[in-house]
């Protein structure tokens, strides 16, 4: 049995979007602090990014590669920020935006050729690993 990568990305997109929308609805009840809004935005961005990546071969590379990776990295940065807020630490929105821009520059300007997919995957994997470690560090501090 083989896995269809497009289906995996599409189902990831649906799951993240539904979870993000539910978290957003819970946040707007007023019973939760702003960390849930950041977490909701994180899941929605990862969902949009996964959906863009699922369109590979059906939509232009700008959408499927560039926009998909930018959204996914932005969502992962917001997850780390949400975790920091959850544990009571401060988060500067302009610093988050700057970090998102810096992390995405190599994907947009360096690894933009179709033949550089292995390099793009390696770079993305390192970035996602580091952002996951940032979330784990905040969880450990909790």
Image: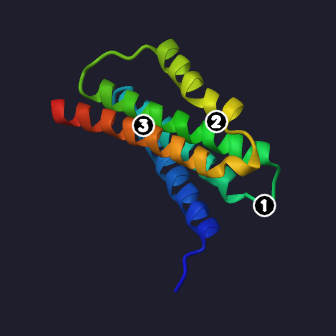
Q: Residues within 10 Å of mark 2 (few under 14, many from 20)?
A: many
Q: Residue 34 appears at what percent x and percent y? A: 39, 26
Give the residue at mark 2: 107
Picture coordinates of residue 62, whole percent (x, y): 78, 42
SS for dot 3: helix
Q: Is residue 39 visible?
A: yes
Q: Which residue is mark 3?
A: 39
- Height in image: 50 above or below 66? below
In this rendering, which labeled residue sits more in front, label 3 or label 2? Answer: 2
Q: Residue 109: horizontal and vertical position, in percent?
A: 70, 30
Crowding near pointer 1: few (<14 within 10 Å), some, many (20+)? few
Q: Which residue is mark 1?
A: 57
Spatial CA distance of label 3 from label 2 is 24 Å
Tell me what residue is drawn at x 27 percent, y 18 percent: 89
Q: CA distance from mark 1 to mark 3?
A: 30 Å
Query: Could you tell me how far apart the alpha carbons at marks 2 and 1 are, in whole angstroms?
Result: 18 Å
Marks 3 and 2, the one that precedes in the sequence: 3
Mark 1 and mark 3 in contact? Answer it, CB < 8 Å: no
Figure coloring: rainbow
Q: Nearer the viewer, residue 30 or 84?
A: 84
Q: Which secondary structure lies at badge 1?
A: loop
Q: Is residue 129 left or right of residue 74?
A: left
Q: Is residue 111 above or below residue 10?
A: above
- In terms of secondary structure, where does tag 2 sit? helix
Task: Write the residue at 59% across / 45% down.
Answer: 119
Q: Which quarter shows the C terminus?
A: top left
- Sequence order check, earlier mark of 2 and 1: 1
Query: Residue at the spot x=64%, y=66% of the render?
Result: 6
Q: State the image quarter where residue 55 is shown.
A: bottom right
Nearer the camera: disc 1 or disc 3: 1
In the shown orientation, is residue 135 left or right of residue 12? left
Q: Is residue 129 left or right of residue 75?
A: left
């Amino acid at each position: 049995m083989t896995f269809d990568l497009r289906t995996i990305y599409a189902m990831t997109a649906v799951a993240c979007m539904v979870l993000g929308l539910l978290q957003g609805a819970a946040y707007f009840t007023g019973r939760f602090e702003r960390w849930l809004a950041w977490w909701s935005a994180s899941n929605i961005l990862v969902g949009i990014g996964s959906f863009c990546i699922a369109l590979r071969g059906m939509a232009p590379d700008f959408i499927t590669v560039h926009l998909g990776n930018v959204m996914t990295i932005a969502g992962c940065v917001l997850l780390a920020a949400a975790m920091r807020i959850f544990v009571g630490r401060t988060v500067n929105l302009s610093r988050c935006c700057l970090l998102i821009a810096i992390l995405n520059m190599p994907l947009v300007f360096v690894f933009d050729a179709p033949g550089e997919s292995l390099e793009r995957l390696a770079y993305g994997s390192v970035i996602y690993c580091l952002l996951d470690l940032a979330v784990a560090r905040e969880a450990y501090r909790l």
